[in-house]
Image: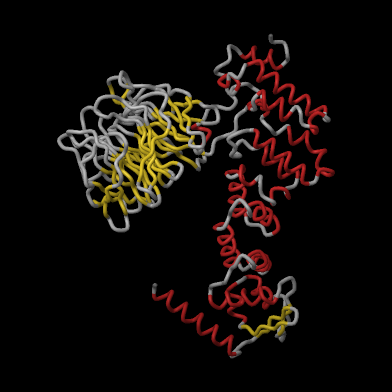
Amino acid sequence: MSDHSESSHESSSVFDKLRQEGDFCDAVIKVKDAEFQVHRVVLCNCSPYFLALFRRWATPDQKVFDISGVSPDMMQLIIEFAYTGSVSVTEDNVQELMLAADQLNIMGVVQTCCDFLGERLCTQNCIGIFQFTFICFHPRLRAKAYHFIIDHFEEVVFTQEFLQLSVQDLTDLLERQDINVRKESTVFEAILRWIAHMPEERNSHIAVLLSKVRLALLSLDYLQLNVMANELVTNNAMCQSMVREAHDIVDHFGGNRAILFHLCNPLVRPRLPKAILLAIGGWSGSNPTNAIEAYDIRTDNWINVTNYDERSRAYHGTVFLNGDVYCVGGFDRAEHFNSVRRFSLSSRTWHEVAPMYYRRCYVSVTGLNGCIYAMGGYDGYTRQSTAERYTPETNQWSLIASMHESRSDASCTTLHNKIYICGGFNGHDCLQTAECYHPETNQWTMIGLMTSQRSGVGVTAYADHVFAVGGFDGSARLRSAEAYNPRTNTWHEVSVMVTPRSNFGIAVLEDLLFVVGGFNGHSTTYNVEYYDAATNEWHVACDMDINRSAVSCCVVSELDNVVAYVSPRDALPFLDSEDECAEFESGDSD
């Protein structure tokens, strides 16, 4: 603490002691039947309201000042804040205290209350906090609460607060491009739930609310069984017209989503995803690549966002941290890298940061507690057991404890504040072993053996387990996958992939485990598939445009410029002509 801060604290303590003892007080604040002896200069220092009260709104000999609109309890807290610089905020008093502080222009208390509410935002209270900011205006808290509603819309719709939304607030939400819903049926069902809460008053709003649903994103079965059969819809001519149009669009294109997603009609325009999967670099054909593709899960489509000025690299690792993507180590045919590059998602530009201690191709990389960890790899001569940690605030790498085994071409992840690294190649054998790093003790611990040897494996945390997927066992590329339970220290097999692969990208997006590209035993591939733990099934996703192995993937979120990483919502690249779109929408197409 500085000398100035110490002297300020001592002064506050002296003034507060004088207040409590009633010494040198020159005014009385009266709130209902409660009276508070104060020093005018202290309250003037706290708020321009009190400065105006004592200087301009009072007579020269006035000693007692009545204040209305504030309870004695809140005035007590505010006066204590004026003297001590701190205030006790609780869930029970925060809204009343914030209103009182706002009325008296005590911005320090207002900010403390805003911080308190912002830190406690949850699905159960976000709408209430958002609505409260209309009574007590605070734009930053309002924006934070509103974005929380948008990001957690699927959970918010099942809360009691959701049922209290006005029709205008609900309409404004439903027409947004960025409400986070994996299925458009969530929006339709949210409308029905809101209306059912007060049907006599709300039935009449069905048409305006239904117009905000992207009806052509629903399946034909859902449209027929759930929407067209709904009594509110069947009894409303405008609703019937909207649903028939959506039904005809879906029926006409036979579920061809690539075409459907690019029609010039708001009924089919996909909403924006909350997060984007990036596939960065890799080995394409016989050469490394600098390609970056972004996966838009709402359209099941890849978009090329490559910065072609960047140097190509493969067998590297990537981490999304503090809004940027870090690309660590790797190989470009000529050099094994110890370099690290940071990709700015806003400008799509690369910047050099501090290099690692060791050159690391086939490196395993993950993030934990705001730091980046790089483990193992190959420096061109030896397979590494060393590991190091990068701290962005200081732009420095520091060595941590070495692993028990040398591992290149392994893969790692973070779960429950620990790092798990699995498989790899030690120069002689494909490894079946795995180990766990405890950052608090800087120690590695061997864990249970995987069911298979796996080099070029993909490892990620998913469904509260560590998943090890694919890889090379010394003789063949694998389709198999297995999951590690840290509570039992055991592995169990799960469903096999559609395509065998090693040296691929792996990431979790919207509770689905994606595997991207890789080497299938014959060639590099652009195939993508995802695993759903809820059903223990793999499903094929849209192929990348570029076939590549040695690719690294990460998921990025909270993008201000998310539209730069998704399919254009208004473009028509998949239609034969603009006339086809116009003809169909006018009903003239076959």
Vertically, is 537 above or below 82?
above
Query: On the picture, is 459 further left or further right than 138?
Result: left
Q: Residue furthest top?
A: 590
Spot occupied by residue 406 in the image (x, y as percentages of width and height): 20, 41
Spot occupied by residue 371 in the image (x, y as percentages of width and height): 35, 50
At 74% from the left and 25% from the top, the residue drawn is 243
> Is residue 329 visible in the rendered structure shown here?
no
Spot occupied by residue 114 in the image (x, y as percentages of width and height): 59, 60
Vertically, is 117 above or below 101?
above
Vertically, is 546 above or below 106?
above
Q: Nearer the viewer, residue 248 or 337?
A: 248
Spot occupied by residue 309 in the image (x, y as percentages of width and height): 34, 29
Picture quarter containing residue 48? bottom right
Query: On the picture, is 26 further left or further right than 501?
Result: right
Q: Nearer the viewer, residue 358 or 152?
A: 152
Query: On the picture, is 431 further left or further right than 225?
Result: left
> Is residue 129 visible in the rendered structure shown here?
yes
At 35% from the left and 35% from the top, the residue drawn is 458
Picture quarter containing residue 180? top right
Vertically, is 146 above or below 265?
below
Picture quarter containing residue 325? top left
Image quarter (top left, top right, bottom left or bottom right) of the C terminus: top right
